[in-house]
């Protein structure tokens, strides 16, 4: 049931993505979630999702597949030839919600993913909690040394953003910039930057954070 729902959502997302690309000159990235709750059929479902992406767009390098930390490592995807195939075709692999499971630095041994998304639990109050500050700092440094991009999830205040800028985090997302929007709302804007709603005093003059 979950896999069927995910496939339907992916089909709709790919359709929307083509509409956005048709009227947007900026480089837009789409990421789709992949639920791998069923370990027995997880790889087959991932393969089906990958095939759907391949047949739906001629810009696979602008599409990513998000797999939660727990699902990624429970299914031993680090050792999967399928993951190598997906990445070699230009589709990025995201490890989502890093920090919600039994996170371990051993996960970085023979890693086969492109982007690490740090969960909101690590980001919340990072400017006030010393342990979070150094944990995220170390994660970002290690990821960058290995060529892995980092996304910070759930950024909600300028103080959190300033710390993430200090760490050279690649991308940030959260209510500080925009709440989730419907497709209709997205298609009403002329520029991607118009989707970002921030306080006029907020300092966003930072090349890597978008």
Image: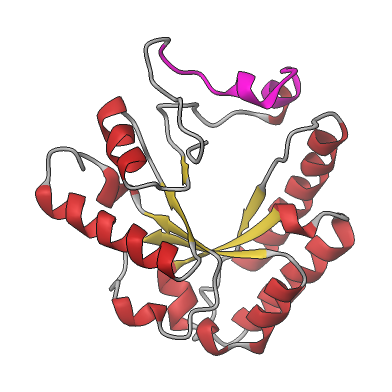
Query: Can residue 120 be seen?
Result: yes
Q: Nearer the viewer, residue 38 or 202?
A: 202
- Determine if the magenta segment contains residue 196: yes
Residue occupying the point 54% across, 89% down: 79
Residue occupying the point 27% across, 50% down: 121
Rendered image quadrant of residue 174 = top left
Spot the residue most to the top: 200
Residue 182 position in % (x across, y down): 65, 29
Residue 81 vs 127, above or below: the answer is: below
Left or right of 84? Residue 101 is left
Q: Nearer the viewer, residue 14 or 64?
A: 64
Query: Can residue 1 be seen?
Result: no
Left or right of 79? Residue 16 is right
Residue 15 vs 24, above or below: the answer is: below
Residue occupying the point 30% across, 71% down: 103
Residue 143 position in % (x across, y down): 41, 65
Where does the N terminus fall, quadrant-wise?
bottom right
The span shown in magenta is 185-199
Rendered image quadrant of residue 186 = top right
Residue occupying the point 46% across, 25% down: 205
Residue 63 position in % (x across, y down): 70, 55
The image's colour scheme reads: secondary structure
Rendered image quadrant of residue 69 = bottom left
């Amino acid at each position: 049931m979950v896999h069927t729902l995910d496939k339907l959502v992916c089909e709709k997302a790919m359709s929307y993505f083509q509409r956005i690309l048709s009227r947007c000159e900026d480089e837009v990235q789409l990421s789709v979630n992949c639920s791998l709750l069923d370990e027995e059929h997880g790889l087959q479902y991932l393969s089906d999702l990958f095939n759907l992406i391949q047949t739906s767009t001629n810009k696979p390098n602008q599409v990513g597949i998000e797999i939660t930390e727990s699902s990624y490592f429970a299914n031993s995807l680090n050792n999967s030839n399928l993951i190598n195939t997906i990445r070699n075709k230009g589709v990025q692999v995201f490890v989502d919600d890093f920090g919600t499971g039994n996170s371990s630095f051993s996960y970085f041994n023979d890693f086969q993913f492109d982007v690490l998304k740090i969960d909101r639990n690590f980001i919340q109050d990072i400017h006030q909690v010393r342990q979070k500050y150094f944990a995220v700092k170390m994660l970002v440094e290690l990821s960058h040394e290995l060529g892995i991009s980092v996304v910070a999830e759930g950024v909600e205040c300028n103080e959190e953003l300033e710390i993430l800028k200090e760490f050279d985090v690649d991308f940030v997302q959260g209510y500080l910039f925009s709440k989730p929007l419907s497709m209709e709302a997205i298609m009403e804007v002329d520029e991607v930057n118009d989707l970002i709603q921030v306080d006029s005093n907020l300092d966003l003059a930072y090349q890597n954070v978008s």
